[in-house]
Image: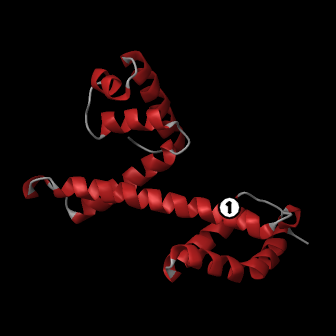
Amino acid sequence: MSTTHKLGYFFSDHHRWLLLHVQRLLRNRADAEDTAAETFCQLLAAQVDPTTIDQPRAYLSTIARRLIFDRHRRRRLEQAYLERLALLPEELAPSPEERLLLLEALTAIDRALAGLPLAVKKAFLLSQLDGLSYAEIGRRLGVSERTVGRYMSQALRQCFLSGAQP
């Protein structure tokens, strides 16, 4: 039997359970459906043979929890960005189309930086969003200017490798 057929059976065996499980966590049917679908998409993309998974519900639950965490993190990031935009004078505020493009770019950069240490992310965001100098970032983070430079190199390399444009 092909992996595609095995995944089809795996999906039919576990989709309903996963959807109900995620819906209990999120209390939102639409987000639960998206998360359940995305969970199976990740399984498909990873090309995992479902017959090798000893504990399917634990496996699916772990993927779903990571996706839920990522969704919450992205929403917090978007909310912080939108709050910041609200502080701008009306004549400087981006159009709705520009906002959408900026939020998409911010999400792409957030995904690109996801695996990096927190200090590296902070340095990158302080530089790119707040326009701070390496010296000022170093003071805020309690590290040397040279360390900030290494952090920035790391973050920019990660953005480049992922295809995100800072």
The image position of residue 106, as x and y in percent, is 38, 51
- Where is the C terminus found, in terms of image quarters? top left
The image position of residue 141, as x and y in percent, is 37, 28
Going by the image, does 143 lie left or right of 43?
A: left
Give the residue at x 31% y 55%. Answer: 80
Res 40 quadrant in image: bottom right
Q: How is the image coloured?
A: secondary structure
Give the residue at x 46% y 33%. Answer: 120
Give the residue at x 51% y 58%. Answer: 70
The image position of residue 150, as x and y in percent, is 46, 22
Give the residue at x 69% y 60%. Answer: 45
Q: What's under tag 1, amino acid-wise?
A: Thr
Q: Identify the element where label 1 is drawn.
A: helix
Res 74 quadrant in image: bottom left
- How many discs appear? 1
| Residue situated in front as seen by the camera: 73 or 39 | 73
**Mark 1 — residue?**
62
> Is residue 101 at all visible to an observer of this figure?
no
- Where is the N terminus found, in terms of image quarters? bottom right
The image position of residue 155, as x and y in percent, is 46, 34
Going by the image, does 51 lie left or right of 7?
A: right
| Residue situated in front as seen by the camera: 112 or 32 | 32
> Is residue 64 at all visible to an observer of this figure?
yes
Q: Please rate how many residues cluster around mark 1, counting C-alpha atoms within 10 Å: few if below 14, some from 14 to 19, many from 20.
A: few
